[in-house]
Each structure stands twice: as structure tokens, then as C-alpha cells.
Amino acid sequence: MEKILYLMRHGQTLFNVRRKIQGVCDAPLTELGIEQARRAARHYTEHQIIFDHAYSSTSERACDTLELVTDMEYKRVKGLREWNFGVFEGESEDLNPKLPYGDFFKAYGGEGELEVRERMNRTLTEIMERDGHQTVLAVSHGASCRQFMRYWEHTSDVQPKGRLGNCCILKFKYEDGVFELLEIVNPNP
């Protein structure tokens, strides 16, 4: 049976503005981040998208974004958190190595690229396999969303152009244990 997952990145944060690596550490949404989440909410309303379940990373920025998008009950899930960048957390983005990161951050107490992919896939598969989960919203983070997309890139013709913007919406079909990216929506031009 076909199901739909809307995987969404959180709104802009203070660390995004200050170009800080935030990973599993946290920063509050900016006024623009709040407005981005409201625009995403309008997108869902205008397209008559109704969720039967909602999930968020345990990060405040993701929870706050979800609460601006919908007032429904939701569950916080550690598996949706951002890539752990180890000792680089809170430091300038200028310290990031060139892409792809691979296992760079593992040497500094963080996660490797494949670990993030596997964690996101395991978490989202488990969520979508639950009974009554036909149309699901999950709010996560840029690097984690990108790694999930890379896990399933072989099943889709849709490819992102550039970075995943704040409150970017990734619409996936889930059927027979397989995710397929159907659409990328950026309600925040």
C-alpha cells in the first residue's frame, strides 16, 4: 500500500545566520525562520494535505518548526536529529571540510556519513511501517535530509539543485519498503 512522507527541514536559526555548525547542538528560530514555517503551513493547507501522524527531531528548532506548521500531537524522535559534527559543533562553517564529508567528523567525536544515512533510513522506515501511517510529516535537518535522499537516490528521477533551503519539503512515496522522492517544494523563495 502506497504511503506518503513529507520530510521537512526546520526554519532558519540564529546559527544559520551566524554561519555556525549546529548539528546536534541547537539555536532558536529567527523571525524569518518562524515566517518560513508559517509559509510551509500555508502550502500544506492550500494543497489540502492532512497528516495522520507527525514526528520531529528532538532539537528545539525542529520542534518549534513543526508546532508552527501544525497544532496536532507529535512525537520527538532522536533518530531524526541532525548529523553529529563532534567538536565542530558551534564553530564557524568555515571549518567544514569540502564535500563529501565521509568519515571526517568521526575522528572528532561525531558521526560518519554512512551512519547518518543508515540512522535516517532506519528511523523513517520504522515510522512508515506503523499502522495508520498513510500521510506523515517528519521535521528534521538539512544534512540528515540530504543523507536520506542519497540513500534512496537510485529510486528517483527527482534531483535537488543546490542546498536544501530552510523549510524545504521533500515528498516521498513509500511502498513495499522503498522510498521514492516525488517532489521537492521550497515554499520560501
Image: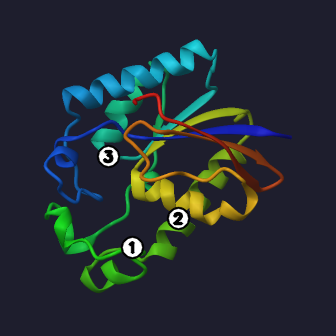
Q: Name the N-terminal-most of marks 2 and 1.
A: 1
Q: Position of residue 162 (x, y in %)?
A: 45, 53
Q: Distance between the residues labelled 2 and 1?
A: 20 Å
Residue appearing at x 51%, y 75% in the figure: 114
Side (left or right) of 51 relative to 144: right
Q: Is mark 3 on a helix, strand or loop?
A: loop
Task: Identify the amino acid type marked 1.
Answer: Leu
In this view, which residue lies farthest toward the bottom? 107
Q: Position of residue 92 (x, y in %)?
A: 14, 63
Task: Identify the amino acid type marked 3.
Answer: Ser
Q: Which of 122/36 is in front?
A: 36
Q: Where is residue 101 in the image (x, y as percent from the top left)?
A: 38, 76
Task: Identify the amino acid type marked 2.
Answer: Arg
**Residue beneath disc 2:** 119
- Give the quarter of the image for residue 111: bottom left
Q: Name the N-terminal-most of marks 2 and 3.
A: 3
**Residue beneath disc 3:** 59
- Of tags 1 and 3, the one toward the viewer is 1
Residue appearing at x 62%, y 65% in the figure: 151
